[in-house]
Image: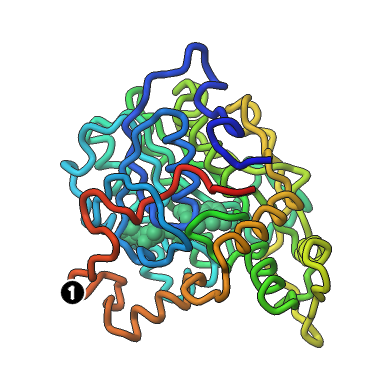
Amino acid sequence: MTLHPSDAFPAAASNRQPPPPAMRVLVTGHLGYLGPAVVGTLTAAGHQATGLDSGLFASCSLEPEPAIGWIRKDIRDVTVEDLRGYDAVIHLAALSNDPLGFLNPDLTHAVNAAATVRLGRLARDAGVPRFLNSSSCSAYGAPDEPWVDESSSPAPVTPYGVSKVAAEGGLSALATDTFCVASLRNATAFGYTSRLRTDLVVNDFVSSAYLTGVIKLNSDGSAWRPLAHAYDIANAFALALVAPSEAINGTIFNVGAEQQNYRVREIAEAVARAVPGATVSMPDRAPADRRSYRVRFGRVHALLPAFHCRLPLDEGIRDLLGNLQRVGFSSTAGLSRIEHLQGLLRDGQVDDTLRFVAPPARASGAEGKTSMAPQAMPPRR
Ligand SMILES: NC(=O)c1ccc[n+]([C@@H]2O[C@H](COP(=O)([O-])OP(=O)(O)OC[C@H]3O[C@@H](n4cnc5c(N)ncnc54)[C@H](O)[C@@H]3O)[C@@H](O)[C@H]2O)c1
């Protein structure tokens, strides 16, 4: 199978006939893990993507990427002028994931909730018709029920999860007849993008099995996690971009697949099956992870009928392994968000609000056109 969004994921075309006109889309956080998948999928569907990112992970790419426009800016500093002229904003920028949220809970709230809602308001003021927010199933945290869906009360147990729930609420309140806003509550992402993260459970296990032959659990492995491939999440954004406004306006919906809820130890076993000789190691008296949620995904199918997850776990693992081999993967350095940001803090490159102290060195591109932008397709599956 080839992971080529234009034939694997005919995203925009599958919702309407004839295909909708190309849209100008501002993708915040395009230099993060999901960015290459989202931008690649949009580009393959004929849309024009521009990125907006403060560049915290600008250097963290495993391979060269095609160029798109890059507004190098912190979302806390965005003005209404930055947002004029776009048909939609896909908002990915965030201090993303649970461990990172603990680095500075106040800052996590400031970026993920306050600045996100402000960004939504500015987009509405700028006349942008559609705003799609990347939320997270971390909202469910530690629920009482064995299964959760969008009607379940959020029970976030981390600053990250709390910030995501706050953003959803603030953004939904902005919806009007002319400003369509929706939050996609994504499952835990996995799989290869050129801006790989190894602090996500599947990617962590695969990269560690690949490099060391050992898959190390930090918990007893009993916790449930819903998983979705990065390119399946990207496809959901592409479909939501062209979905009728009346279908999605003001909604929050889970993105993933019911059959892709796994216990962490099952994920470890799946990785062990795919990497010859790899073993699973668990610490003595391993603690249980409080965050455990099994998620239902009925609503996304009702709102975006063309959506389904096309990259199941086993296939995503095989693909990731193939890509690691292809790019000559030899180290996880720079691929854990918290470690990378701690490095920037230690080196004095960013202050404690994660703003760059001096203009960052020009990587292989700076504001304007940049070659740091995401690729249209991962070249191999
Ligand atoms: N990766 C997952 O498993 C997952 C699951 C569910 C939801 N999400 C959500 O999807 C979005 C994208 O996730 P990701 O894994 O690509 O995250 P990421 O951490 O890899 O990338 C986030 C990007 O946002 C940028 N950014 C951070 N703070 C910024 C600021 N103040 N101003 C401008 N740019 C800023 C960073 O530089 C980075 O490029 C996030 O909102 C995340 O919460 C991710």
In-front residue for pair 122/278: 278
Please name whichever residue, 365 or 353, is drawn nearer the observer in this view of the structure: 365
Q: How many marks?
A: 1
Instruction: Estimate the x, y position of residue 275 in percent, counting from the top left.
Output: 78, 66
In the picture, measured across the screen, residue 185 lies left or right of residue 151, that is: left
Placement of the N terminus among the 4 image quadrants = top right
Residue 75 figure quarter: bottom left
At 46% from the left edge and 25% from the top edge, which residue is drawn?
242
In the depicted structure, whether residue 347 falls above or below residue 243: below
Q: Position of residue 210 (x, y in %)?
A: 69, 71
Q: Amino acid at mark 1?
A: Ala
Query: 154 or 349, which lies in front?
Result: 349
Residue 196 can be seen in this image = yes
Does residue 156 appear left or right of residue 286 in this picture? Answer: left
Identity of the residue furthest to the top in this view? 18
Residue at point 35%, 63% (across, down): 58
Q: Quadrant of ligand 1?
A: bottom left
Q: Residues within 10 Å of mark 1 (few under 14, many from 20)?
A: few
The residue carrying mark 1 is 358
Viewer can see residue 112: no
Q: Assign a secondary structure to mark 1.
A: loop
Image x and y of residue 18, in percent:
48, 12
